[in-house]
């Protein structure tokens, strides 16, 4: 993919080893110098519960595995906010409003 920036072509490459995953939960932290987005993959840990049934499982814990950490300058995050807002607006105009739980 070629992207133009100030009339200078920028070639975007994707390495095959780039991981792809579904972000099940995200945490944001910040300091004076910037922001960090921590992306988790969640997995439930189950235990058997014979009093409910022979094969009954109950959730014992949620294990959150960090799969990525992305750091942003305040400026970069503000730009990302605008891009996300534009994308949500386009999505909702096409598919309807996203209902929050």
Image (cartoon, rainbow, N blue to C red):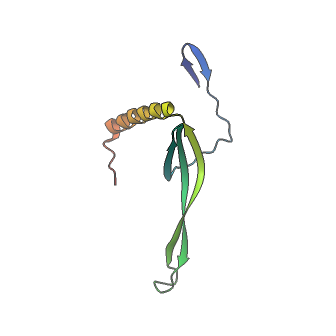
47 relative to 63, above or below: below
The location of residue 87, given as percent across then percent down, is 41, 35
Residue 73 placement, left or right of 91: right
Residue under the point 64% across and 30% down: 13
Residue under the point 55% across and 18% down: 4
Residue under the point 33% across and 39% down: 92
47 relative to 97, above or below: below
Residue 32 placement, left or right of 94: right
Task: List the single residue furthest toward the front.
Answer: 32
Residue 16 placement, left or right of 79: right
The location of residue 41, given as percent across then percent down, is 55, 55
Locate residue 90: give its quadrant: top left
State which quarter of the image contains the C terminus: bottom left
The location of residue 18, given as percent across then percent down, is 65, 41
Count of numbered badges drawn on the protein:
0
Task: List the single residue furthest toward the top.
Answer: 7
The location of residue 12, given as percent across then percent down, is 61, 27
State which quarter of the image contains the N terminus: top right
Residue under the point 53% across and 44% down: 37
Residue 55 placement, left or right of 12: left
């Amino acid at each position: 993919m070629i992207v133009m920036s100030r009339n200078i072509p920028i070639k975007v490459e994707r390495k095959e080893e780039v991981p792809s995953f579904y972000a099940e939960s995200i945490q944001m932290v910040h300091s004076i110098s910037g922001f960090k987005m921590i992306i988790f993959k969640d997995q439930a840990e189950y235990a058997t519960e014979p009093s409910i049934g022979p094969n009954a499982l109950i959730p014992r814990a949620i294990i959150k595995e960090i799969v990525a950490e992305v750091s942003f300058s305040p400026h970069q995050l503000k730009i990302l906010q605008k891009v996300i807002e534009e994308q949500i607006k386009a999505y909702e105009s096409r598919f309807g409003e996203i209902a929050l739980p």
